[in-house]
Image (cartoon, rainbow, N blue to C red):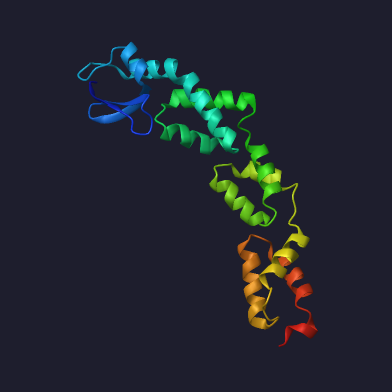
Amino acid sequence: MEITAIEAQKKDNTRCSVFVDGAFFCGLKIDVALEFRLFVGMEVSEDFLEKIQFESEKSVALERAMRHMSLALKTEKEMRRFLKDKGYLDPVIEHCIERLKYYGYIDDENYCREYAECHKTIGKKRMTAELRLRGIDSSTVEKVLACFEDDPSEMERLLERYMRGKEKDFKNRKKAQNYLFSRGFSSDDINEVIDRFFTDEDEGY
């Protein structure tokens, strides 16, 4: 293996990208590259480069990950993607994930609970889909959301807001049903709320 390029990164002038045999291999702090006297044309092994990055960047990567976490909760999958996009190799990523779990920064069960508490305007079906997209496994999602139920009062509030200024006719009834369904509420709960809202005397059909 041969280092074919060492280029400064555009988004972070303290880091450089190391290319081996014409392909991107990893990102490194520039001072680390200088410390180990890396240069274009240098013959290296994969183990050598991985060891350099792991030992020199695990603390930097962890600090960067924790700053990223301070902005908002992240799932394990989201954090792995973030670190991968920053150019860290798998051993560094695994070290960071392990430390973040140990410190309680990453906890997918807690993420599910926080998400459910903050997103009461959507139903459990949509919550499940959104959480799965964030990389949380189905068993964890099911376990946490089993403690939550769709809130009829929230559905009624959404329905009243949606129907503001609209006629209580058959056409708008169907549109209202589709609106609530798109927010992930169950069909039974939707029909119950719709039936209460569209009374016989007001339906106009």
Q: Quadrant of residue 197?
A: bottom right
| Residue in the picture at 34% in, 15% down | 48
Relative side of 100 to 51, left or right: right
> Could you tell me residue 64's position as x and y percent?
50, 27
Q: Residue furthest left?
A: 41
| Residue in the picture at 45% in, 23% down | 91
Give the quarter of the figure containing the C terminus: bottom right
Q: Quadrant of residue 107?
A: top right
22, above or below 145, in the image: above
Choose between 9 and 182: the one closer to the eye.
9
> Could you tell me residue 199's position as x and y percent?
79, 79
| Residue in the picture at 47% in, 35% down | 82
> Could you tell me residue 27's position as x and y percent?
36, 26
109, above or below 117, in the image: above
Residue 47 appearing in the image = no
> Could you tell me residue 118's position as x and y percent?
68, 48
Relative side of 140 to 153, left or right: left
Q: Residue furthest front?
A: 13
Give the quarter of the figure containing the N terminus: top left
199, above or below 180, in the image: below
